[in-house]
């Protein structure tokens, strides 16, 4: 196979996908395009209510099967200008979502075309273009996909467009909250002294910023969104923040959650209630942890595959929050791999390097074929 020629075709395919807006929760149009593409390749395509897309290259055995997945959603609102810019001098392509995850979806479709023409596969290989990986999508697409395939699923390879040298096989657990305050509010002059939802939430947020999570195991928090109020001269009746908690260790995450709950609890006492203040919390994200060992056969195969295409694995970057969290949390071996180099993820000037794509495709194909053979031997 001429991987240099495949690289150009893949870049063109990637741009086609990137031009279809797919913010988390509104992936339907892109999912429809992916489904049509797979049907044109000759696959029997299925979709679910979330707009996940499924196709299967049949092998000699149904179970255990291999799933290869890529998420279709992006972080960018539907109104984002998706214009692409080519930098020929540095062999880069710029555009919102070009790497995360248009390149991943394009690579999934490329693999589907290659395996369609394979003479014989040891096991079924499922191609899944799933929704809801980013932000408050909370991995809902991958949850539904694993629910659907779990009776036959033996392993999973998750594709991200960028990060060719990374092999993620440890799932970073996280919990996300929306914390909302309501209060009587009123006019800033005539009702001065009435409780303000913004003042209450600002005090609460200030306490959150004093949290000191451990450096080891690495544990973090972030207030990523804060909003509320009506106008500059209105005592706010409502305010809201969104809080992200993460840790490499489930016990450390549980401890941090307990500390957050204790802070929130101090604003739910009778004193605050008598002032007309109510503070509530809602879980808006709960990503489970899990892992396979550094010396797991799937991890070692991924490392060998990268070495074979002359890419040095970044073995210090084994942990992340990806769609692989879901199979890993259920005891199903999984890795998340990248196709090329890139940068500025989640920015409108996101970019991918085109030169490494050939190596990324060889890596993806080799690892897929190895995993299929490995699962075939496990029956």
Image (cartoon, helix red, strand yellow):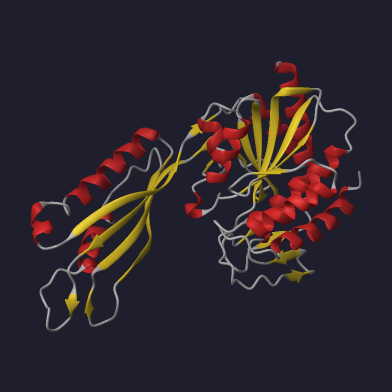
Q: Nearer the viewer, residue 235 or 333?
A: 235
Kindly identify the residue that appears in the image at 65 percent across and 54 percent down: 101
- The reply to whether residue 75 is in sight is yes
Q: Nearer the viewer, residue 135 or 130?
A: 130
| Quadrant, the N terminus | top right
Which residue does the image show at 65% across and 34% down from the upper left? Answer: 156
Residue 342 vs 238, above or below: the answer is above
Q: Position of residue 188 (x, y in %)?
A: 17, 81
How many marks overall? 0
Drawn side of residue 367 relative to residue 183, left or right: right
Residue occupying the point 64% across, 28% down: 153
Looking at the rendering, which quadrant does residue 120 occupy? top right
Give the left or right position of residue 15, taking residue 318 as reference: right
The foreground one among 144 and 362 is 144
Residue 71 image position (x, y, % from top left): 63, 49
Left or right: residue 349 compared with residue 259: right
Residue 287 image offset from top left, x and y in percent: 46, 42
Q: Is residue 18 left or right of residue 282?
A: right
**Residue sitting at the far front:** 49
Q: Is residue 341 visible?
A: no
């Amino acid at each position: 196979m001429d991987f240099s020629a495949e690289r150009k075709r893949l870049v063109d395919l990637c741009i086609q996908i990137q031009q279809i807006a797919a913010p988390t929760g509104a992936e339907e149009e892109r999912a429809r395009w992916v489904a049509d593409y797979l049907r044109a390749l000759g696959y029997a395509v299925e979709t679910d209510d979330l707009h996940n897309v499924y196709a299967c290259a049949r092998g000699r055995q149904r179970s255990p099967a291999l799933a290869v997945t890529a998420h279709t959603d992006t972080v960018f609102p539907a109104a984002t200008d998706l214009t692409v810019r080519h930098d020929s001098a540095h062999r880069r392509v710029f555009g919102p979502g070009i790497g995360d995850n248009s390149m991943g979806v394009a690579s999934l479709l490329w693999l589907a075309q290659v395996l369609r023409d394979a003479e014989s596969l040891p096991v079924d290989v499922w191609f899944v273009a799933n929704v809801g990986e980013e932000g408050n999508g909370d991995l809902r697409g991958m949850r539904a996909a694993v629910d659907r395939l779990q009776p036959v699923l033996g392993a999973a390879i998750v594709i991200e467009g960028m990060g060719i040298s990374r092999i993620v096989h440890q799932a970073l657990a996280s919990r996300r909250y929306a914390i909302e305050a309501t209060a009587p509010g009123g006019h800033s002059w005539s009702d001065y002294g009435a409780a303000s939802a913004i003042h209450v939430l600002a005090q609460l947020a200030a306490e959150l910023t004093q949290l000191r999570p451990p450096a080891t195991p690495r544990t973090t928090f972030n207030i990523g969104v804060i909003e509320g109020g009506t106008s500059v001269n209105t005592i706010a009746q409502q305010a809201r923040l969104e809080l992200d908690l993460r840790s490499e260790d489930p016990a450390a995450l549980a401890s941090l959650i307990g500390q957050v709950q204790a802070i929130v609890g101090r604003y739910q006492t009778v004193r605050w209630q008598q002032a007309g203040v109510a503070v509530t919390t809602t879980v808006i994200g709960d990503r489970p942890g899990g892992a396979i060992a550094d010396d797991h056969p799937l991890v070692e195969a991924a490392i060998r595959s990268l070495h074979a295409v002359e890419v040095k694995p970044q073995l210090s970057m084994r942990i992340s929050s990806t769609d692989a969290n879901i199979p890993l949390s259920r005891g199903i071996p999984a890795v998340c791999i990248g196709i090329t180099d890139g940068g500025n993820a989640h920015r409108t000037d996101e970019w991918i390097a085109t030169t490494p794509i050939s190596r990324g495709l060889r890596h993806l194909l080799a690892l897929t074929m190895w995993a299929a053979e490995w699962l075939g031997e496990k029956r």
